[in-house]
Image: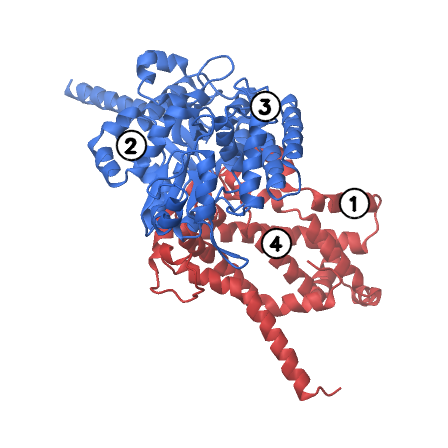
Amino acid sequence: MEEKKYEVVLKVFVLQLGAMLMILPFVWLVSTALKSPGEVFTSGLSLIPEKFMWSNFTAIMDQAPFMLYMLNTVIVCTGILVIQLLLVIPAAYAFARLDFTGKDVIFLLFVIQIMLPLESIIIPNYLITKNLGLLNTRTGLILPFVASGFGTFMLRQTFKQVPKSLEDAALIDGAGHLRFIWHVLIPLSRPTIVTFSMISIATHWNDYFWPLIITDVDRVRTLTIGLGMFVQQESGSDWTLLMAATLFVCAPIIAFFLATQKSFIKNFLTSGIKG
Amino acid sequence: MKRKIFFSVICALTIAFASSASAKVKIKFFYPVGVAGPLVKVMNGMVADFEKQNPDIDIEPVYAGNYNQTMQKVQTAVMGGNPPDVAVVEISELYSLLQMDALIPLDGYIQKEGGKAFLKDYFKGFLGNAYGRDGKMYGFPFQRSTPILYWNKDMFKAAAAKLKAVGLDPDRPPQTWDELVAYAKILTIRQGNQTKQYGLIIPGGWDDWIFEAFSRQNGSQLIKSDGLTVTFNTPENLEALKLWVKLMQELKVCPVLRPWNITPDDFIGGVTAMMYYSTGGMAKVRKTAKFNWGAAFQPKHKQYGTPVGGGDFHIFKGIPKKNQDAAWRFIKFMTSPQMAAHWSIESGYVSVNKKGYNLPKMKAFLKKFPQMKVARDQLKYAYPKMMAVNYQLIRNAMTTNLDAALEGQKTPEQALADAQKLMEKAIKGQ
């Protein structure tokens, strides 16, 4: 069907307007991060600072070792994701494709895990971590999150959609479980895996409470703790520094999303699970 | 022979070195950051000063988030059998810590320092929250504040003619509740439906704390000092809440539930002529406000009155005696005149040690910023902040019901009665 020209123009206009609205808070964040404190709350709306305060960034680096925090965050998020994938893919395969006794009950337990908020299990987690001698270690930051009920559920649904005939064909060609997973299921489920990875990274990138509870030393602390230092209760916040720190913390995540957005969007177009 | 002597000297040195290394006491110190500014750095600097003077003690300062998060980190660590040695926690949490049997009394240490003579150097208003129900002292004041009234002198001057017309002095802030209403009415500037300038902001978020001040000014309180008897629903408190509702709903001279941490920016940005706020916000106002401003006692009704706020030091149970002793030395150092004054200048908190105000450094500072004196002087009328177990639940009951009344979802009577019920339940939950 041919689209009429005015339809295209209208569509693009509406979409661009939407995009502008979406991006405005981010532009505002960047702008505030570069302003001086006196400029933040002026009556008129001005997005371009009078003078670019790059010193805001040196000021936050001065308050906490943000580069070290960044390194720790990357290590922890990558660690969680890699182990999650190693565990989630076989588990999802088992639930989607194999038959064994107690399958439904075990799957239900996996799904229940999605409903449990972290806060409700923080004391047992703390005790286990402490007894394993993992307080103040990156391993302690990774371990409680490696088994993801959410990921298992998500991938199981995707694996179920793969036609049985493909499995039969692979079996006839002599493929075992692992070979079938590697050569057939994973390539077919790539968008779901990418989506799950994005959600996992974004979630654990933003984790605050668990790292705050189990770490005491800068050596293993993560970005969100550094960010927390700029949010104050008794006085007003220092908005320019808070925004500079926020920008530093979220920039890698945004870059990551931009790099992988094609697969991400593709998955939302094809899969039935949202969010 | 020579060799033998040489050998024994080496041995002695080794032993001396080894024992000095092992004698170094390691102290873990949890602290929250409540006010803006590079306070993590200031704290680390103070810790370094202490270590320089006390080479046998090694302090590990641990930033633990805001007040609520610090309390949660402390609670988790205590329950996990891994308590910190010393921590700064919000003052209303004392009873919860005592219920967990987490703290040691400090009376022994204080006796050794000279007992009452030693405590005389500290402001009495700040010591009220340090005692448990058994009369023993479990906390030691450190970063302490009170709410005060900030006023924009330039805005008062701009409205001088109108203020004088009704017999109000434009060169001073309101001193009574009635004056507060009168000033706020005149200082509010409206253009059509839009409010260009508010007369006053009573911020939300910690409105329970400001409400406690109004309650005190009216001769009442929210929870009695036994930490058991809830007196939230009293005629005096009802009068206070009705005043708030009048300011926000009827006269509209005060915005409804302005977020706590935006309020200083409203004041600095000229959105409001007055604000009730913690002294903790003073450093920020001082550094960024581009107009003449003053700080004043909160206006009185039956009397002047205010609760104190902030955080106290605590020493924990379940750690070696030598750690507890070292922790006390640390507390003593941090609240010494020099350090208390330094912390006050950097943060805007009140120096808990009276002698801090006699130091030349502090005197010079106060000369430049006389506003900082107000919080200290208001301490004459300060009462201990309410304390009770399950304080976080209680605070939640108070703020949600105050908020509902201020937003007009509940009548003031209903809100006070509902909060009273929830607070009693939370206390009985022990």
The earlier-in-sequence mark between 2 and 3 is: 3
Residue type highlighted by circle 4 = Ser
Position of residue B195 in the picture relative to residue B164 (left or right): right
Q: CA distance from mark 4 to mark 2?
A: 47 Å
In front: label 4 or label 2: 2
Chain A rendered in what hue? red
Measuring 84% from the left and 51% from the top, which residue is drawn there?
A99
* Other residues around mark 2 within 10 Å, as few (<14) / some (14–19) / many (≥20): many
Q: Are marks 4 and 3 in contact (CB under 8 Å)?
A: no
Q: Is the residue marked by circle 3 packed among few (<14), some (14-19), or many (20+) residues within 10 Å?
A: some
Do badges 4 and 3 share one subunit?
no
Residue A200: numbered disc: 4
Q: Please tell me which residue lies in front, A138 or B157.
A: B157
**Cα separation between marks 2 and 1:** 60 Å
| Mark 2 residue type | Ala
**Residue B292 badge:** none
Which residue is painted at 50% across and 53% down in the image?
A74
Residue at 59%, 25% (x, y): give it. Answer: B234
Does residue A66 appear anywhere in the picture?
Answer: yes
Nearest to viewer (mark 2 / mark 1): 2
Q: Colour of chain B?
A: blue
Q: Which residue is mark 1?
A: A108
Q: Please tell me whether residue A130 is drawn above or below residue B114 in the rendered image.
A: below
